[in-house]
Image (cartoon, rainbow, N blue to C red):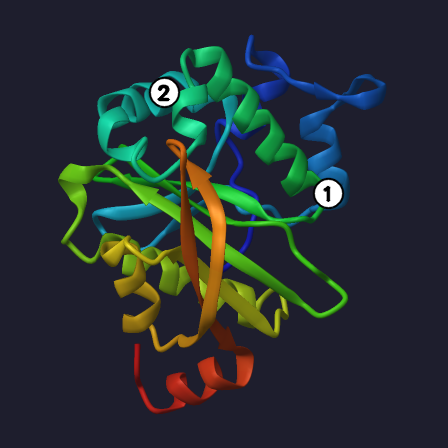
């Protein structure tokens, strides 16, 4: 994944639109991003049908509507869904994710299939001392089973190991989420253990399974033409 600023992107218009957001000290979030992360992930085309775009306030309404359409399905797995009741909630989440990106502490990307937003994939907070992070994701139910999320995860792995210089990337999932678990297995992650009762949702505790992939394992697999 090549990281570059695309002139004319939606992010480039933030300072001139009603979507302008700011952080502490009345500093434009756009300015802080450009100051701290001159090379920004704004758009990455994977193939003719699929691309990743940095989440911006510009996309607030389409993201909220997709969450709302998948509310029953998503609420089974993600506690944040029930707290997302309006476009304002989505906008606040996007602003928070842009803040993390500006702080060089992970980012969230929208998944666009044939120019339609269908989900999100993220690098969570980065531990730069040991050069590790984790991947989180969700996908609209009607687009599952097409290999889309596996492809997107593969792009993030390449970016994390080859561009960001990370040494370890994790994926964690509830032990009963078989679709989510299939992705790290398919990508060659190693199952490392079970975190017992770390998730409390709908008045019930759930276990998480932890999968990890190291940079040397990724490099070796690429040399063999795997993934």
- Does residue 1 appear in this view? no
Q: Is residue 26 left or right of residue 66?
A: right
Which label was assigned to residue 185?
none
Residue 154 x, y percent position in the rendering: 37, 65
Front residue (pair 19, 62) = 62
Q: Nearer the viewer, mark 1 or mark 2?
A: 2
Q: Is residue 188 left or right of residue 96?
A: left
Residue 108 x, y percent position in the rendering: 50, 42
Front residue (pair 98, 43) = 98
Residue 13 x, y percent position in the rendering: 55, 21
- Does residue 99 appear in this view? yes
Front residue (pair 165, 85) = 85
* Residue drawn 56% across the image and 11% down it: 17
* Residue drawn 45% across the image and 20% down it: 83
Which label was assigned to residue 103?
1
Q: Is residue 43 left or right of residue 25?
A: left
Measured along the vertical axis of the image, is residue 100 above or below residue 30?
below
- Crowding around mark 2 (Cα neighbors within 10 Å: few <14, some 14 to 19, many 20+) is many
Residue ID for mark 2: 64
Which numbered disc flags the more N-terminal residue, 1 or 2? 2
């Amino acid at each position: 994944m090549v990281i570059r600023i695309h002139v004319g992107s939606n992010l480039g218009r933030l300072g001139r639109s009603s979507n302008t957001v700011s952080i502490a000290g009345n500093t434009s979030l756009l300015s802080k991003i450009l100051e701290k992360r001159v090379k920004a992930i704004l758009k990455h085309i994977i193939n003719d049908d699929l691309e990743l775009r940095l989440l911006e306030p510009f996309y607030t309404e389409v993201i909220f509507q997709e969450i709302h359409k998948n509310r029953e399905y998503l609420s089974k797995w993600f506690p944040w869904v029930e707290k997302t009741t309006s476009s304002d909630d989505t906008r606040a989440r996007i602003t928070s994710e842009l803040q993390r990106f500006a702080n060089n502490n992970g980012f969230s990307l929208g998944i666009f299939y044939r120019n339609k937003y269908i989900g999100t994939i993220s690098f969570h907070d980065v531990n730069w001392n040991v050069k590790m992070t984790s991947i989180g994701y969700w996908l609209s139910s009607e687009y599952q089973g097409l290999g889309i999320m596996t492809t997107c995860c593969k792009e993030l792995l390449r970016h994390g190991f080859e561009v960001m210089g990370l040494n370890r990337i994790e994926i964690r999932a509830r032990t009963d989420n078989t679709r989510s678990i299939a992705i790290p297995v398919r990508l060659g992650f190693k199952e490392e253990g079970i975190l017992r009762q770390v998730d409390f949702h709908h008045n019930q505790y759930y276990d998480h399974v932890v999968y990890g992939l190291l940079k040397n394992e990724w490099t070796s697999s690429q040399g063999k033409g795997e993934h």
